Amino acid sequence: MRVLIVKTSSMGDILHSLPALTDAMLSVPNVSFEWVIEEDFAQIPSWHPAVNRVIPVAIRRWRKNWFRSLVRKEYQEFKKSLQLYSYDAVIDAQGLMKSATLVSRLAKGITHGGDIHSTKEPCASFWYDKRYNIPQKKHAVQRTRILFAKSLRYDLPTIIGNYAIAQRFNKNLPLDSGQYLVCIHATTRRDKEWPEMQWRRLIKFIQTTGLYVKLPWGIQHEFLRAKRLAQGFSHVEILPKMTLEKIAHILAGARAVISVDTGLSHLAAALNCHNITLYGPTNVKLIGTYGRNQIVLCSLEKNMTTLTSDTVQLSLEQLLYETTACD
């Protein structure tokens, strides 16, 4: 069975889709997946053993220059790649008009998606051949697992979802594996940022544990924040700019991860890292980190100012004690 997945972005949403692939891989004989995804995240599907082909798309970039000849040419090349094969099922897990009209409907195969009550943009459901009701109040991982089970006609497994990518990275851990913590400080929304003063207090405490800290970053202002967080601390390393695959290797080798609400926090969860995620305005029951070894700390208000380093330190101390006892 050849199945096309349409899930183009964002990083967290893409990672949330992986357990559904694992369910299908274990439930449907000889199933293989191809995946349409935004070019920036094209590495991720290739990590899953059931994905045979990745089809990059650049809707985010194209829509800014849609009428330029180069963009139109790129879209035609994408369309040609999309229509190279016929599919037994096309599952639109994005639930948006752009995914339904610019991707799913152009593919050769019966399209599946949420009904008018279950998609992010209700009008998108009219473009699907098969529509399903997906409970809105379940976690995003569970909603995608339900969509796949209904689309491919198998019973939804009752066990916790398995991302099936941790083993890829656990085979080749960094030489300093287990000796460091990763602090994921960067996020796209200001109301999800944890104050720098609180980060520095936590980093100062980490110095007493004998572990050192690695700080990843993606764009210039995140690099500048990393420099401010590291200033005066000899146990802090600012990582170079890395691909997602290299960052995943770093995360997999961490003793623990402390993160704000961002795509990398979901990557840490997908890798089964011991992960403390700090939340403010996010509804964690619907889109919080999902999986084993996850600790969620929520601010009392819909911002991050009431979540103190003392609270995070207590959770981290307990986590380090438990992981030491298990060694």
Image (spheres, helix red, strand yellow):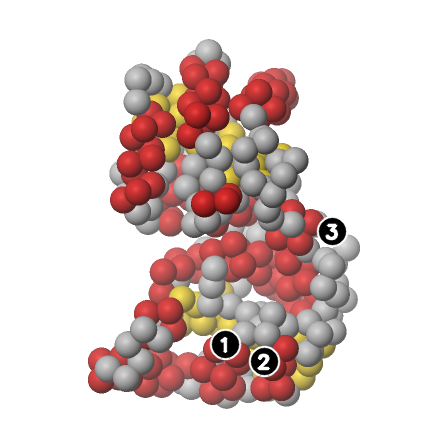
Q: Residue at x 32, y 73 (%)?
A: 64
User: What type is the residue that disc 2 sits on?
Assistant: Ala
Q: Is residue 315 above or below residue 62?
A: above
**In the image, what residue occupies the spot 60% across and 82% down?**
123
Amino acid carrying label 1: it is: Ser
Q: Earlier in the sequence, mark 1 or mark 2?
A: 1
For the point 60% across and 70% down, which residue is it? Answer: 120
Q: Name the residue carrying label 2.
A: 124
Residue 31 visible = no
Q: Is residue 244 left or right of residue 297?
A: left
* Residue nearest the viewer, comparing 113 with 98: 98
Disc 2 + disc 3, Cβ < 8 Å: no
SS of the residue under disc 3: loop
Q: Are marks 1 and 2 in contact (CB under 8 Å)?
A: yes
Disc 1 marks which residue? 99
Secondary element at tag 1: helix
**Amino acid type, residue under disc 3 in the picture:** Ile
Q: Quick one: which residue is furthest to the left in this view?
A: 69
> Is label 1 or label 3 in front?
1
Q: Measured from the top left, where is residue 184 in percent x and y?
A: 44, 37
Q: Give the residue displayed 56% in from the left and 44% down from the top.
A: 269
Residue highlighted by disc 3? 159
Mark 2 Cα within 10 Å, few/some/many (few <14, many 20+)? many
Is residue 140 visible in the rendered image? The answer is: yes
- The Cα–Cα distance between marks 1 and 3, rounded to whole angstroms, is 30 Å
Discs 2/3, front: 2
In depth, the one of 89 and 72 nearer the eye is: 72
Label 1 neighbour load within 10 Å: few <14, some 14-19, many 20+: many
Q: Gap between marks 1 and 2, in whole Å?
A: 8 Å
Expressed as whole percent of the image width and height from the top left, the position of residue 250 reads 40, 37
